[in-house]
């Protein structure tokens, strides 16, 4: 315990120097401003801004990069709420209720609760990392291919609950998402699957492209569809910040979201993706009136946003303690560290204690900065909605195109968001929900690859999924959830939970 | 019309090469790195170009165009204007293994480029899980030949360095372990540390921290000399394995047709960068091998590419490895 405090004070000693405070602020600010462009998620933002950190000392550079990461992550939620464009998998859920809140003139409340929830989650997650980072590392190692597959199966059951409408349509959309995830080069054999010989499909469909098209572009088309909805978002903007009632509704989801997100964030292979989905599922499941979800429920923003940020923090654990990046953003951080002469690995903690603890302390500082930067900005973002839609939508379209091009520099990606926009528009018209499809898409690839990996290692024996206790437990939870959903005797209960 | 103008410009450029060389570079240069930002090749590119930019007086801007084992980015770079304003960082995969892995490859590594020079080599290390029942390469090879059906070899996906060098390893030692594919080195290492898979071959920069931390064990490094980063790890030759010397080299290329004096300027800037103390220090920290003066020239790079294509093609074809 004494260690814990001396480490933290060492860390804050580093993080609170004037230079590092300034860098954290600058990183968060730049990250927020760039991340708020639709489609420009944390990866593109960090990659773009990497060169400007070259002149700094490693600790300062990493503090700034971490700031850019939080800023961009948060910026993604802002676009999800304001214009219904989730920049990455984790803000898909925020778009569901957040954008509905914006349409009801509660954009300020949604943005505010997202910022406050994120700050709280970030604070807790920072403490978790500082106190339990090293022992929690073992959790990451328990999760092999077998456990991961079972976790994904559980995740797919969550996807069913995400749907607002018919359960059959939701399952159909999940399966379409899983199918889309199989497009591209097969990982084990290197054969191309369902690419029709088109080179730009060889690496599969990019998540950002799919999400931006299905959500963002389709949303624009729907808004242009009929005149009256165009004005909805421009109506009276209402309060800019959440009031006491909002807090009362939101604080429990924030606590639960933080807990769920923090645990899933530690898992390797992008477990953090599941956090917001799991939190949303839980909130909808225990809500007195689940029908409010998808129509602007504040819990549907508070919980997932907290889970998102908690996961974003704890996903640093495998990187800091082992040097193993659990997802693409962290892989980029590894690169950034290496460029600055620090090769991430188990020795960073002992070899560079000032860097290690300084970074942890700066996480909290970064979260505070984010709050300081974003609460005043809420007013500005909300005023953006007042811009007449005929001026706003070409701007959104243009930023979408720039954003998507900046990720892989591929012109075909820009064409693709147009194509998926059309598909998304048709789906909306036929009453299909895009969110389960996106979750199916994210989980599908992880599920397939881990299933095959597990079976290769077990030499084809399916028993491996039951023999391993963690995997068996996860499968059992999934099965129970599914039984509850499908058992005819409790059909009435199911209808309440799963449908409107 | 545009084509005519470009053609005229090219002719004018050729006619006035002397003048152009004095002017070049007058604007920022784009370097296409065919992998995601943050990977080993990207890191080498950023370290080397940092100093080159200062020498040339113009910024070299890195553009990451990832996809299809790096061939997407290289294809695009190969087809760009050969004016010296678009260059690329190729590597062992894109300019050595690719012709065997991608039958429909749109470029020929030996013919479609103006080589600039070798930037850095990153040696390959043979690593295994820490519980592996052998402690040196000899014991490992012994175990491998007796328990071929039990051993799992991890790699970071078809077309990755760990995949190509792993297949090469298997062909040299005549082993047939079960191959387990991962999406990238990170997840593969994670499962190696968790004792889920048995061994892999990968670049020193990825595995060195885990070896030093005692999370995995290293049997040998596939270079003629030991690495200062891992002084206790024997070379393959020292450990008794002949014929397995391999490194994931990174090298700068320009598209074919780039004026000779531009190539010279870039090559001189690269050489100067590799002599810079700061560049050297950062590359060495990564476990990189800095090429000697004779290995850095455009001519030496051309020879390297030819010998690498000749080396990888039969190995990968025999293993039936293809990425299409």
Image: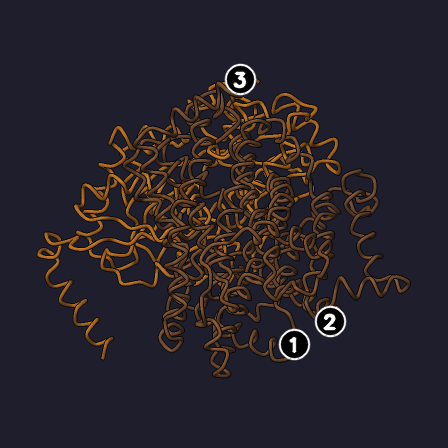
Q: Which of marks 3 and 1 is nearer the N terminus?
A: 3
Residue labelled with disc 1:
A431
Furthest residue toward top: A2
Residues indicated by labels 3 and 1 sit on the same polypeptide chain: yes
Give the structural element (helix, strand or loop) at label 2. Answer: loop
Residues at circles 3 and 2 in contact by the CB criterion of under 8 Å? no
Q: Residue at x 65, y 76 (%)?
A: A431
Residue labelled with disc 3:
A3
User: Badge 2, how many Cα within 10 Å: few under 14, some, many 20+?
Assistant: some
Question: Which of the chains bears the disc numbered 2?
Answer: A
Furthest residue toward front: A244
Who's orange, chain-wise?
B
Give the structural element (helix, strand or loop) at label 3. Answer: helix
Separation of residues labelled 3 and 2 (CA atoms): 54 Å
Q: Is residue B87 visible?
A: yes
| Image position, residue A307 (x, y; %) | 59, 47
Report which colour depicts chain A: brown
Q: Which residue is drawn at 65% across and 73% down?
A: A432
Q: Which of marks 1 and 2 is nearer the N terminus?
A: 2
Residue labelled with disc 2:
A166
Q: In this view, does A21 lie above or below B139?
A: below
What colouring does the structure picture have?
by chain
Rendered image quadrant of residue B211: top right
Q: Is residue B75 visible?
A: no
Residues at circles 1 and 2 in contact by the CB criterion of under 8 Å? yes
């Amino acid at each position: 315990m004494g260690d814990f405090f001396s480490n933290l004070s060492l860390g804050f000693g580093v993080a609170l120097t004037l230079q590092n405070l300034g860098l954290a602020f600058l990183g968060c600010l730049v990250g927020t401003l760039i991340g708020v462009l639709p489609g420009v998620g944390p990866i593109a933002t960090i990659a773009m801004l990497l060169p400007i950190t070259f002149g700094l000392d490693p600790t300062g550079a990493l503090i700034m990069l971490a700031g850019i990461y939080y800023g961009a992550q948060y910026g993604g939620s802002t676009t999800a709420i304001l214009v219904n464009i989730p920049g990455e998998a984790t803000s898909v859920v925020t778009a569901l209720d957040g954008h509905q809140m914006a349409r009801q003139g509660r954009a300020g409340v949604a943005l505010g609760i997202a910022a406050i929830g994120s700050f709280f989650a970030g604070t807790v997650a920072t403490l978790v990392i500082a106190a339990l980072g090293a022992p929690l590392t073992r959790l990451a190692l328990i999760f092999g291919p077998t456990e991961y597959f079972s976790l994904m199966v559980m995740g797919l059951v969550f996807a069913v609950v995400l749907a607002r409408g018919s359960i059959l349509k939701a399952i159909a959309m999940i399966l379409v998402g899983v199918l889309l995830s199989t497009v591209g080069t097969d990982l084990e054999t290197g054969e191309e699957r369902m690419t029709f010989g088109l080179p730009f499909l060889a690496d599969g469909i990019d998540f950002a492209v799919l999400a931006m098209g299905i959500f963002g572009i389709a949303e624009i088309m729907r808004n242009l569809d009929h005149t009256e909805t165009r004005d909805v978002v421009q109506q009276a903007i209402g309060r800019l910040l959440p009031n006491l009632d909002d807090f009362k509704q939101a604080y429990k989801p924030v606590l639960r979201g933080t807990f769920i997100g923090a645990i899933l964030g530690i898992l390797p292979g992008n477990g953090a993706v599941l956090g917001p989905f799991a939190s949303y599922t839980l909130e909808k499941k225990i809500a007195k009136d689940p029908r409010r979800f998808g129509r602007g429920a504040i819990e549907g923003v508070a919980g997932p946003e907290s889970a998102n940020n908690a996961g974003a923090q704890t996903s640093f654990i495998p990187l800091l303690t082992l040097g193993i990046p659990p997802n693409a953003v962290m892989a980029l951080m590894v690169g950034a560290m290496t460029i600055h002469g620090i090769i991430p690995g188990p020795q960073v903690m002992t070899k560079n204690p000032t860097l290690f603890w300084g970074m942890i302390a700066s996480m909290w500082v970064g979260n505070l900065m984010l709050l300081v930067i974003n609460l005043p900005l809420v007013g500005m973002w909300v005023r953006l909605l007042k811009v007449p839609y005929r001026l706003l939508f070409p701007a959104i379209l243009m930023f979408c195109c720039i954003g998507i091009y900046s990720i892989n520099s591929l012109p075909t990606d820009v064409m693709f968001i147009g194509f998926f926009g059309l598909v998304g528009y048709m789906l909306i018209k036929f009453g299909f929900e895009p969110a389960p499809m996106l979750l199916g898409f994210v989980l599908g690839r992880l599920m397939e690859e881990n299933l095959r990996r597990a079976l290769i290692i077990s030499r084809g024996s399916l028993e491996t999924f039951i023999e391993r206790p963690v995997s068996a437990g996860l499968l059992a939870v999934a099965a129970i959830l599914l039984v509850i959903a499908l058992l005819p005797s409790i059909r009435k209960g199911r209808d309440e939970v799963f449908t409107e | 019309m545009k084509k005519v103008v470009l053609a005229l410009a090219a002719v004018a450029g050729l006619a006035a090469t002397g003048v152009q060389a004095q002017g070049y570079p007058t604007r920022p240069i784009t370097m296409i790195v065919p992998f995601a930002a943050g990977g080993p090749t990207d890191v080498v590119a950023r370290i080397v170009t940092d100093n080159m930019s200062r020498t040339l007086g113009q910024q070299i801007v890195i553009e990451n165009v990832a996809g299809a084992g790096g061939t997407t980015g290289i294809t695009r770079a190969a087809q760009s204007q050969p004016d010296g304003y678009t260059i690329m960082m190729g590597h062992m995969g894109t300019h050595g293994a690719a012709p065997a892995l991608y039958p429909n490859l749109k470029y020929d590594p030996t013919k479609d480029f103006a080589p600039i020079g070798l930037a850095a080599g990153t040696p390959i290390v043979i690593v295994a899980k820490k519980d592996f029942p052998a402690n040196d390469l000899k014991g490992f090879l012994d175990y491998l030949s007796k328990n071929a059906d039990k051993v799992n070899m991890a790699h970071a996906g078809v077309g990755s360095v760990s995949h190509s060098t792993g297949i090469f390893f298997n062909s040299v030692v005549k082993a047939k372990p079960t191959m387990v594919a991962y999406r990238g080195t990170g997840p593969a290492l994670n499962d190696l540390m968790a004792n889920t898979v048995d061994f892999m071959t990968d670049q020193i920069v990825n595995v060195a921290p885990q070896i030093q931390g005692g999370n995995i064990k290293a049997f040998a490094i596939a270079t003629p000399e030991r690495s200062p980063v891992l002084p206790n790890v024997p070379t393959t030759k020292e450990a008794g394995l002949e014929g397995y010397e391999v490194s994931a080299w990174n090298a700068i290329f320009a598209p074919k047709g780039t004026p000779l004096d531009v190539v010279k300027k870039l090559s001189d800037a690269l050489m100067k960068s590799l002599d810079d103390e700061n560049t050297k220090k950062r590359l060495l920290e990564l476990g990189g091998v800095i090429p000697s003066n004779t290995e850095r020239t455009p001519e030496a790079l051309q020879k390297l590419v030819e010998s690498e294509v000749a080396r990888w093609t039969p190995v990968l074809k025999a293993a039936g490895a293809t990425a299409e």
